[in-house]
Image (tube, rainbow, N blue to C red):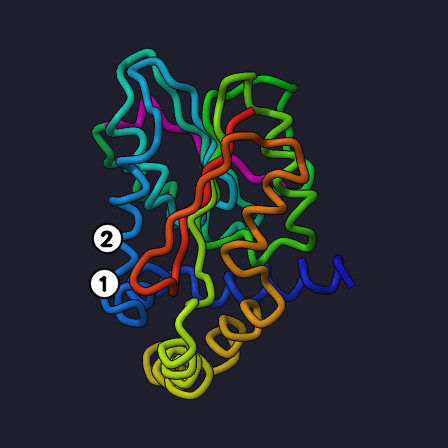
Amino acid sequence: MQGDKATYVHDVFSKIARQYDTMNSVLSFQQHRLWRNFAMRQLPIQSNSHILDVAAGTGAWTFAMARRVGSEGRVVGLDFTEAMLDVAKERLATSPDKDKIQFIHGNAMDLPFADDTFDIATIGFALRNVPNVEGCLREMMRVVRPGGVVVSLELSKPDMVWFRKLYYFYFYNILPRIGQLVVGDRAPYAWLPESLTDFPDRHQLEDIFRSVGLSHVRSYPLTFGIAALHIGWK
């Protein structure tokens, strides 16, 4: 099942790589930019920080973090979908921070780094796509140094029942149709609600952060809880 999910996710994001950022803006009504900006304010980024951005996709969060580190800092963006990395690398060629960024092909479930390599490990809007949430967080914690942080910015489930119903109606009925109009294929955006159905809510994900050994875990609901930021310390 895990292998099947990984293959399916790879195929989905291969199809939409070129439209990925535009569709994020359309489907979230630009909220994803506000969520990422909020997350950036919570990250303990120093001028010499070494950061890993897991499932970096086209690199939006990778580039944002690179702007915050100094000349001694580094940000590595890792993704297992080649088409997404192609877009990221095209952007890298003209980025003023290109000397601080490296994009590599790799698997979030088996990170190709030694223990205690990074100060911060992030994953943005991708934790619900991995075959095993706990396993991915354990890998992220493994490659972070003691005193470092593991961070997830992800879609979530609103706590308020009335808003959750309204959100689910949009998510399950309207969002795939918008995706079909823009991309010409309903399937990739039908995957979004499917991927959230069995994903833990904000409080359950806090518990998973703690269960893998992270401490001082905090979570922040965003836009009435349709997204959430989780931070845990090693």
Q: Is residue 68 above or below residue 33?
A: above
Q: Which residue is mark 1?
A: 30
Q: Nearer the viewer, residue 170 or 12?
A: 170
Q: Nearer the viewer, residue 83 or 78?
A: 78
Tag shown at residue 34 = 2
Q: CA distance from mark 2 to mark 1?
A: 7 Å
Instruction: Kindly identify the amino acid type of the residue bearing the numbered disc 2.
Output: Leu
Q: Is residue 161 above or below residue 142?
A: below
Tag shown at residue 8 = none
Q: Report x, y in % for residue 145.
A: 55, 17
- Residue located at (23% from left, 63% from top): 30
Mark 1 crowdedness (10 Å alpha carbons): few <14, some 14-19, many ≥20: few
Say which element carries label 1.
loop
Q: Nearer the viewer, residue 223 or 111?
A: 223
Say which element carries label 2.
helix
Magenta region:
97-107
Q: How many marks?
A: 2
Q: Is residue 74 above or below residue 40?
A: above
Indicate whether residue 148 is drawn in magenta.
Answer: no
Whether label 2 touches label 1, CB < 8 Å:
yes
Quadrant occupied by the N terminus: bottom right
Mark 2 crowdedness (10 Å alpha carbons): few <14, some 14-19, many ≥20: few
Q: Nearer the viewer, residue 185 or 219?
A: 219
Is 30 displayed left or right of 128 in the figure? left
Indicate whether residue 100 is drawn in magenta.
Answer: yes
Q: Report x, y in % for residue 229.
A: 41, 47
Q: Report x, y in % for residue 24.
A: 33, 64
Instruction: Kindly identify the amino acid type of the residue bearing the numbered disc 1.
Output: Gln
Residue 86 shows in this picture: no
Quarter residue 129 falls in? bottom right
Q: Nearer the viewer, mark 2 or mark 1?
A: 2
Is 107 displayed left or right of 15 in the figure? right
